[in-house]
């Protein structure tokens, strides 16, 4: 080998060392505040069920009712495709996958509601409902019939209901511990958050519970529900939601947009309260920017137009829900709320169509990037990250199969995870 050519430099090595030392606190801050996506599965939706109607067979019942809606209003792929405007090449695949999903895993994320969907009850009634919810949750996980993610939405931290919310949370978590421990898919939702101090209060409650039960510090996380204008913009002009994420001290797992409370807070009339209203778009855009890189995920809200009644009305509601879900997916809101079993067919149809439509192109682009074979699109490491994440989300929800992904990309799931969640600095380094 020839002798390496000597290159000229002007800076002493001490300069770089001094710069590195001066930026060490910034490096640590970046790692703490922006750890990146956790790499875990994100459910495509959250189903809210009032605590008083929760039953052992709730998840299966939602799936059966969704299948019955398909049987009645779109009994085959052609009729379903005609309602939603699916192309011929997607119709059979999407319809078959929707039915299979409803049979196998109809609900990905179940939230047992003790807030708006439950209302005010006597303390004795809510105590009993919270204990029952814990028992049914534990039994469902033991039997293998639970949704992958399950938990409660407690009452908020505002003064009139604060003590009740804390007690319900304590009863539910204590019941799970008595039944054998907290399930891996546990998710808690804190609603109507207005000030970061309310998030801090939730952190302190969970810290106290973990200490009382001998759990690892930080074991319990929670979602923050954005339902007030003050949670987006504070009186001093700052983005409150960004401060809320930091106030959670690493425990925040999601920001969930509350369509109707937020719209009403801004004075939007009932007829125009929807997830595609400009006010909703603004709020979610702020949430998205605040959460980017923090590991906190953003969820869209819901529609209150239910697919019930005549076939014509069901089809109208399905088209609306499908369109809103596709719109959200294009804007990188990969999760939303579903309020009725009849929403499940169009939730999964929209999700499956979204991933299957772009599958071959995404797979080809990632394969070219991985193999450095070039092509008509010059992708960068950040784009490879997006492509890997797209394929992983498609796999997790059932839109894609690992065999077809491997066949078109030549990559394993571990490879995809490596592209979708690079360590900080790897994007820049790999672009050199």
Image (cartoon, grey):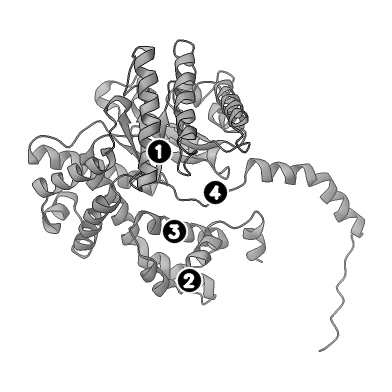
Q: Looking at the figure, which quarter contains the N terminus? A: bottom right
Q: Which mark is residue 40?
A: none
Q: In this view, does 84 lie to the left or right of 210?
A: left
Q: Which of 12 and 205 is in front in this view?
A: 205
Label 3 with label 2: CB-CB less than 8 Å: no
Q: In this view, does 199 lie above or below 125?
A: below
* Residue carrying label 4: 37
Q: Which of 233 and 174 is in front in this view?
A: 174
Q: What separation in Å lies between label 3 and label 2 (alpha carbons)?
A: 12 Å
Q: Is residue 416 above or below residue 140?
A: below
Q: Is residue 379 above or below residue 113?
A: below
Q: Is residue 381 left or right of residue 343?
A: right
Q: Which residue is drawn at 13% across and 39% down?
A: 314
Q: Is residue 213 left or right of residue 359?
A: right
Mark 4 or mark 1: which is in front? 1
* Residue carrying label 2: 411
Question: Going from the N terminus, do you reach mark 4 or mark 1 first?
Answer: 4
Q: What separation in Å lies between label 3 and label 1 (alpha carbons)?
A: 29 Å
Q: Of helix, strand and loop, which one carries label 3?
A: helix
Q: Of helix, strand and loop, which one carries label 2?
A: loop
Q: Residue at x 53, y 75 (%)?
A: 371
Q: Is residue 408 left or right of residue 352?
A: right
Q: Which of 217 and 334 is in front in this view?
A: 217
Question: Going from the N terminus, do you reach mark 4 or mark 2 first?
Answer: 4
Q: Which residue is drawn at 17% across and 48% down?
A: 67
Counting from the top left corner in percent of width and height, residue 18 is at 88, 50
* Residue carrying label 1: 138
Q: Of helix, strand and loop, which one carries label 1?
A: helix
* Residue carrying label 3: 392
């Amino acid at each position: 080998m020839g002798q390496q050519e000597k290159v000229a430099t002007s800076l002493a090595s001490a300069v770089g060392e001094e710069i590195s030392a001066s930026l060490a606190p910034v490096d640590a801050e970046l790692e703490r505040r922006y750890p990146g996506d956790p790499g875990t599965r994100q459910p495509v939706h959250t189903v809210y069920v009032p605590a008083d109607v929760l039953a052992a067979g709730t998840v299966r019942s939602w799936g059966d009712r969704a299948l019955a809606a398909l049987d009645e209003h779109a009994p085959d792929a052609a009729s379903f495709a005609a309602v939603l405007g699916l192309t011929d090449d997607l119709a059979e695949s999407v319809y078959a996958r929707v039915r299979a999903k409803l049979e196998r895993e109809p609900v990905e994320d179940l939230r047992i509601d003790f807030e708006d969907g439950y209302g005010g009850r006597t303390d004795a009634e809510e105590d009993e409902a919270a204990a029952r919810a814990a028992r049914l949750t534990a039994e469902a996980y033991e039997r293998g019939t639970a949704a992958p993610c399950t938990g409660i939405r407690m009452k908020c931290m505002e003064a009139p209901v604060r003590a009740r919310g804390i007690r319900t949370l304590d009863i539910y978590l204590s019941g799970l511990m008595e039944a054998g421990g907290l399930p891996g898919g546990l998710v808690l939702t804190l609603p109507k958050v207005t000030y970061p101090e309310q998030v801090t209060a939730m952190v302190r409650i969970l810290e106290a519970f973990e200490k009382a039960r001998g759990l690892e510090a930080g074991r319990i996380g929670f979602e923050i529900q954005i339902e007030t204008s003050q949670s987006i913009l504070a009186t001093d002009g700052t983005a409150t939601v960004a401060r809320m994420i930091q106030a959670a001290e690493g425990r925040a797992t999601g920001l969930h947009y509350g369509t109707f409370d937020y719209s009403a807070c801004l004075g939007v009339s009932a007829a125009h309260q929807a997830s595609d209203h400009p006010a909703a778009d603004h709020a979610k855009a702020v949430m998205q920017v605040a959460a980017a890189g923090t590991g906190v995920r953003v969820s869209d809200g819901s529609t209150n137009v239910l697919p019930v009644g005549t076939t014509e009305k069901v089809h109208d509601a399905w088209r609306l829900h499908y369109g809103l879900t596709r719109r959200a997916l294009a804007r990188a809101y990969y999760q939303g709320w579903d309020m009725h079993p009849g929403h499940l067919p169009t939730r999964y149809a929209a999700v499956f169509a979204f991933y299957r439509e772009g599958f071959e192109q995404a797979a080809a682009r990632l394969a070219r990037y991985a193999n450095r074979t070039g092509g008509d699109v010059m992708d960068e490491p950040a784009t490879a990250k997006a492509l890997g994440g797209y394929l992983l989300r498609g796999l997790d929800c059932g839109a894609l199969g690992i065999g077809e992904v491997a066949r078109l990309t030549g990559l394993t799931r571990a490879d995809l995870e490596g592209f979708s969640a690079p360590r900080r600095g790897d994007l820049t380094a790999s672009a050199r």
